[in-house]
Image (cartoon, helix red, strand yellow):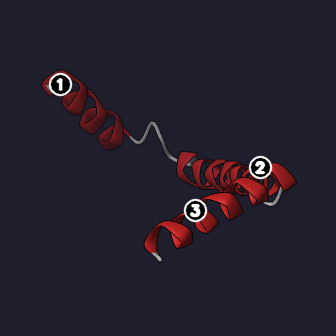
Amino acid sequence: MHRIASAVRKARQRGHDAGMIPAEYALATVAGCGAVGILYEVVTSTPVKNAIGDVIAKAIHWIF
């Protein structure tokens, strides 16, 4: 682990990753938006809505 940290420090000191950060932010933003889009489609699908409704109904009947 110490060797990896040392190598990263040396690479940063030499400036090897100059310009990488904006590309990483862009990639993370696109990946995040894609993941949210897929999650939205899954959660708003009819089977998932029905399953969530069933769980809530069972919980309400169990409590009361």
- The answer to whether residue 36 is above or below residue 5 is below
Residue type, mark 3 in image: Lys
Callout 1 secondary element: loop
Callout 3 secondary element: helix
> In the depicted view, which residue is nearer to us: 56 or 12?
56
- The answer to whether residue 63 is above or below residue 1 is below
Callout 2 secondary element: helix
Residue for badge 2: 38
Residue type, mark 1 in image: Met
Mark pair 1, 2: CA separation: 36 Å
| Label located before the other in sequence (1 or 3) | 1
Mark pair 2, 3: CA separation: 27 Å
> In the depicted view, which residue is nearer to us: 55 or 63?
63
Mark identifier at residue 1: 1
Could you tell me residue 23's position as x and y percent?
64, 49
Residue for badge 3: 58
Which residue is found at the position 77% from the left and 49% from the top? 38
